[in-house]
Amino acid sequence: MRGTMSTIAQTYEESLERICRESIAPNAPSVDRNGAFPEQAIESLRAAGFLGAMSSPEIGGLGLGLGGTAKIVRRVAEECGSTAMVLCMHYCGVAVLEAHAPVVVRRAAATGDLSTLAFSEAGSRSHFWAPQSTASNGEGEVVLNARKSWVTSASRATAYVWSSRPLGADGISTIWLVPSNTSGLVVEGPFEGLGLRGNDSCPVSANDVRVPHSSILGEDGKGFEVMMGIVLPAFSILSAACSVGFMNAGTARTAAHAAQTKHSDTGSALAELPTIRNYIARMQIKTDMASALLNDAIAAIETARPDASLRVLESKACAGETANEVLDLAMRVCGGAAFRKEVGVERYFRDARAAGVMAPTTDVLYDFIGKAVCGLPLF
């Protein structure tokens, strides 16, 4: 199927709908229940070329850009948050590879290799741009030592886009491509979490891991520029797309539950109660507001608008915070049925919580946005 990339690029939404219906949705409950990596979903997406959505058509990708990948992540999130987050991190990694990796690496990512980011550390916490990991020279190679606190797809990714302190140059950080099978890497799994339970997000330690100097992505000491110029916009937009997907699904499931659930004594449906309709209306309005801001942020990036950076920050903060509000209402409307998982909204309720604590956290974003509005420097 990889030989028909141009056809898929034109009809990817139809292909994605089929995969969501046949592979992602049926397996989402068990992925969540068992904390299992969404292997079948990722394999279906890989086979249809969707891992290459961010990659250039010249090297086998779909060339859909950030707007196209956001649509994919949002649609997948409506069915399975874990699969959506795996895609989100893959696309963020690929965005860096597209800018700085050699063609052979870019082609591998476009045609099926699963990438991910390895930035988060306990020491830097939400300040992901300031790693404590070290890089040093050792007999013609680069020696990496670190303990990354959270790496999505940790045991399943082909390679990590890895941050460290600079090798020798001035600056805050440097970015490397580290194959996941490199000697000295240790994945400390499995993941056992509240939400996104199948995203295989685990600590990864590097103990004297050796990579060639050619593994550098960009320039030594210029990792901050890569993080702020490539990763932050991509992750913010795709994280927001995940959150909007959760809201879309939660609102639709809540409305369906309210329409079909009836009081035995009166025969009236929940949806006939003005209070219930009021809650569902709030859910829809909040969802549409977050979606509109997300779409505007993408448009701002694509047209290089002066407010693009502000919109990027706002999109993740707004979508993450609003998703919590929408899914809170979903649990309230669906009541006991939601707690028994009959409606399916509690999975989205749990998955939505992750956005607020994934760096940059919502609180850090509010600080950035406040600084930008007040005319202060972000750093």
Image (cartoon, rainbow, N blue to C red):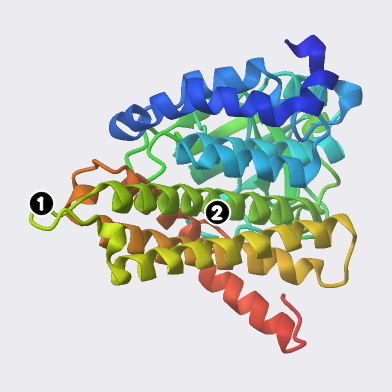
User: Would you name the residue on which mark 1 appears?
Assistant: 264
How many residues crowd mark 2 within 10 Å: few (<14), some (14–19), many (20+)?
Answer: many
Amino acid type indicated by mark 1: Ser
Image location of residue 177, percent across then percent down: 72, 33
Q: Is residue 150 above or below residue 128?
A: above
Image location of residue 365, percent across then percent down: 60, 70
Q: Nearer the viewer, residue 145 or 22?
A: 22
Q: Is residue 85 visible?
A: yes
* Image point (64%, 64%), residue name: 315
Q: Earlier in the sequence, mark 1 or mark 2?
A: 2
- Answer with the quarter of the image where residue 43 lies: top right
Amino acid type indicated by mark 2: Val
* Image point (21%, 57%), residue name: 268
Image location of residue 112, percent across then percent down: 68, 19
Disc count in the image? 2
Image location of residue 207, percent across then percent down: 53, 34
Tag 1 and tag 2, C-beta contact below 8 Å: no
User: Would you name the residue on which mark 2 appears?
Assistant: 244
* Image point (57%, 68%), residue name: 318
